[in-house]
Amino acid sequence: MPSETDDAFVRSPWMAFLMSISVATMYRGCWQWMLLVCLLSFPLFAAAQSESATGQSARLSDGAAQSLLTRLAEARNPAKPAVIDEIAMSGDARARGWLEAFSASKLARLKDAERFLIIDNNRGREWAVSDALSGESAGKVSRRDLKTLRSNNSLRGHIDGVLSMIDLSSPDAEVRLAAARGLRGSVDEAMAERLPSLIEQEGDDAIRATLKEALAIQQLEANGDPAALDTLSGSLNAAAIAAINGAAVSDDPQLAQAAKVALAGIEQKLQLNSGLETLYFGLSLGSVLVLAAIGLAITFGVMGVINMAHGELIMLGAYTTWGMQQLLPGQPGLALLLSIPAGFLVAAAVGVIIERSVIQHLKGRPLETLLATFGISLILQQLVRTTISPLNRIVVTPEWMSGSLMINEALSLTLNRLYIIGFALFVFAGLMLIMRRTRLGLEVRAVTQNRAMARSMGIKATRVDIMTFALGSGVAGLAGVALSQITNVGPNLGQNYIIDSFMVVVFGGVGNLWGTLVAGMSLGLLNQFLEPWAGAVLAKIVVLVFIILFIQKRPRGLFPQKGRAAEG
Amino acid sequence: MPDSRSWLARPFTERSTQIFLAVLTLSVLAITLLHVLLPEGHPLHVSTFTVTLLGKYLCYALLAVAVDLVWGYLGILSLGHGAFFALGGYAMGMYLMREIGDRGVYGNPELPDFMVFLNWQELPWFWQGFDMPAFAFLMVLLAPGLLALVFGFLAFRSRVTGVYLSIITQALTFALMLAFFRNEMGFGGNNGLTDFKDILGFDLRTDAVRIALFIASGVALGLGYLLCRGIVGSKLGRLSIACRDAEARTRFLGYRVERVQLFIFVVSAMLAGVAGALYVPQVGIINPGEFSPLFSIEVVVWVALGGRATLYGAVLGALIVNYAKTVFTGIMPDAWLFALGGLFVLVTVLLPKGIAGLFAQRGWGRRSQSSAAKTESASGSRPIEEATA
């Protein structure tokens, strides 16, 4: 839920109820398919419902509620659906909680008493329970004193449908859409009769289409309706595909044939979608590589300094994010935004210290620079390990970055990766601007091309060195801020990226920012496209070997520097 | 200085080699005698544990000599020599695994334990022949040698040098580490090869075998040192120094630089393999951790501390750093990485010629060092086109 609406939700019990519904429907949608997963998530259910039930004015009197539940408990199984319907129709805010608890076998009755309880936690001998009527916690009760109301699969299916029907008349379009999505594959005959009128009333196109699909699935499964098959033919929904699969093996040869055609079309669409998904993962991995490597492209590519501590500068950026979030508890989003400049400054400052204290003494000795900066990387790692912790720190992902963007049934893009792709492009564009359009960039390029000449033109080469190194290090810090959102923040974070980063820079061609972008993206894509048939580790090995071989062919990378700069 | 004597005999006339060999022989002898002759409780008695530890150091020293040969005399900073060391170790480990026979946990006479555990039905082809010690010992040389040959051929032919070469050697060992971590590779995956019982029919856990391995490590170090000294003093060695200091100039003089580089690189890789092979029976395990880039780069720092292009400096550096590591990780493990990191920085910034450079400054062994001193001064001020290429 978006944070700015939190207040409204808390104030209105009805909205709180809806919130719990939407949470619950999300789970219910996959019930048909992943019963196991759902069973595991029942504690969540219970939590959601007990929250919504507290402090609400029930429409049913306690006596009426008690009698309804008693009937539910005492009715024989064939008679139970009717009672369930009655409970659902009562309009009571607690009804959902009861039904869900019943369906999860978490509605229990105290032995030798009439009181109904909802089991919140059934670990151990003493079970945590809350009162079904008041919703208040009732402490712990020995499991021997409880008599759980048993439900079965057909009852669960029924409850499922009944609850969706309640949601479908909700005023909130989101809730209706979620309910409609959950309905697909779980429509039974009774519901199928009521659906057409609901579809009629529905104003929202997306919801109506989803409802039609849900109805068509039932029609296809129950009657083998060819018209239903037409409705479903482009769908990527798992339930729809299952229904078509069923139709493909039906006795009616015409229907089977049509279903097979539809399946082929769906198969093609699915493949396209999985291709797009791989592309997305590849681009997101690629942008992570670009972010990690682009600072290196500046220090190594432009200045010719091998900074093995680059990975640790990334790590410092990530830890800055963590530190910011510790300083601003409860506001992870603000902390993340603030840590963009903070991460840059911290890493840049450390970079300047490294440059002044070590690297400037090793000018013209690249191999020694490599060793010394490697030593610095060990020291920084150990410093974090001793002063903060050897364990991974938890960096919270702000709400506007979590979740995913659903393109269609088979393709959804996770938001945090989308943000990182955007951030990488943003950083890249910023660096390009600095190198091409500012005085600093001009001076950096001048010093790179011909240091002596640049100095004789009055450029302070030492100052340029410091600024360049600070810029490269700062960008590493930015990479760290971004990485903190997708990987574990620990002392080894930098180590994991340093070899990859060097590979990207070397592959792209030293001293060329465009080369870094292209190389990072293509290595990311290559890795993701290899992964399905080679596995993650083997894909990485193949990529490494590929780069090693590539360097043999083109020792100066994809985009080698040309002209005199290449000789220097 | 043209010399009519054979290249391998010549080092015996060098003062530094004489001193090194004498010191090495005497220390190995002394430790052996102190271990064998003195009773257990005697204050000067050297325990089996210490003997094994020292044997391990000697293997590291041989590895450092191999790295010094390519870095000091050829100007190639290999950050992947750990890979050759580990390959030699794996070849030895495979032989030791086959020696276990049916005494493993699963008692399978044909398959090592981890293969039984992974439900493999038969020995993979690359494990064939490792039950024969002669074949296994040959592979100790051939496996790293072949890898170095292929890798070096590709790299030197396309004139990949300097920092680029360092980075791709690091990528090489990293890729191998990832590969060896995989169970499907057939080298024991994460756990590596361990649980060894015998070597050449002798029980590995007995004192006699331990001291024999220690002596073997000492002998290997001595021979490796001699070999390197011989190469370095020969015409080939002078050529390799020429490649280091002015690669383009040497090429223009008509020498095939890449062949020189390839030869020295392969020899060095084989030496590293031998070091690994002697290391494994002494520590009793070989796992993919030996391939880690950190280990390879640590070896480079041993050489840098001791002083590159001296060979004896490499030995000295390996012994000092590893002794320090043992002490530090024993008393305050947290401080070790600080110390190691600080060592990297201090040595490169303040001691570019290492400890051996200090010796040379004081005038120790100057007469015998005339050739080495020249190369050292050359390495300090490398021509600019080499340094930035």
Image (cartoon, coloured by chain):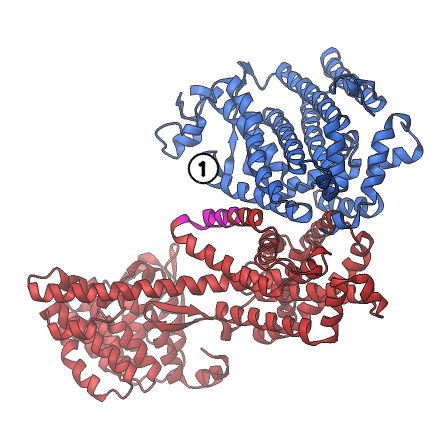
Chain colours: A red, B blue
**Residue that protrudes farthest toward the right in the picture:** B362
In the depicted structure, whether residue A137 falls above or below residue B4: below
In this view, the residue farthest toward the top is B37
Residue bearing mark 1: B185
Pick the residue in front: A289 or B94.
A289
Relative vertical location of residue A35 with respect to residue B153 in this rendering, above or below? below
x then y, percent, for residue A512:
63, 63
Q: Is residue A173 above or below residue B375?
A: below
Residue A319, horizontal then vertical, whole percent = 64, 62
Mark 1: few, some, or many residues within 10 Å (few <14, many ≥20)? few
Looking at the image, which residue sits at the far left?
A: A252
Taking the spot 54% from the left edge, 50% from the top edge, the residue there is A550
Q: Nearer the viewer, residue B129 or B250?
A: B250
Q: Secondary structure at mark 1?
A: helix
Looking at the picture, how far across and down is residue A556, in whole percent?
A: 62, 54
Q: Quadrant of residue B83?
A: top right
Q: Residue at x 85, y 39 (%)?
A: B377
Q: Is residue A360 left or right of residue A162?
A: right
Residue A262 visible within the image = yes
Residue A535 lies within the magenta run? yes
Q: Chain of mark 1?
A: B
The answer to whether A354 appears left or right of A6 in the picture is right
In the foreground, A154 or A554: A554
Asked if one can make out residue B331 in the rendered structure from this viewpoint, the answer is no
- Span highlighted in magenta in the image: A534-545
Q: Residue at x 73, y 34 (%)?
A: B240
Q: Quadrant of residue B86?
A: top right
Q: Please state, as top left, top right, bottom left or bottom right, where the N terminus of chain A lies in the image.
A: bottom left
Q: Give the main secondary structure of the magenta stretch.
A: helix
Quadrant in the picture for residue B344: top right
The C terminus of chain A lies in which quarter of the figure?
A: bottom right
Q: Amino acid at mark 1?
A: Met
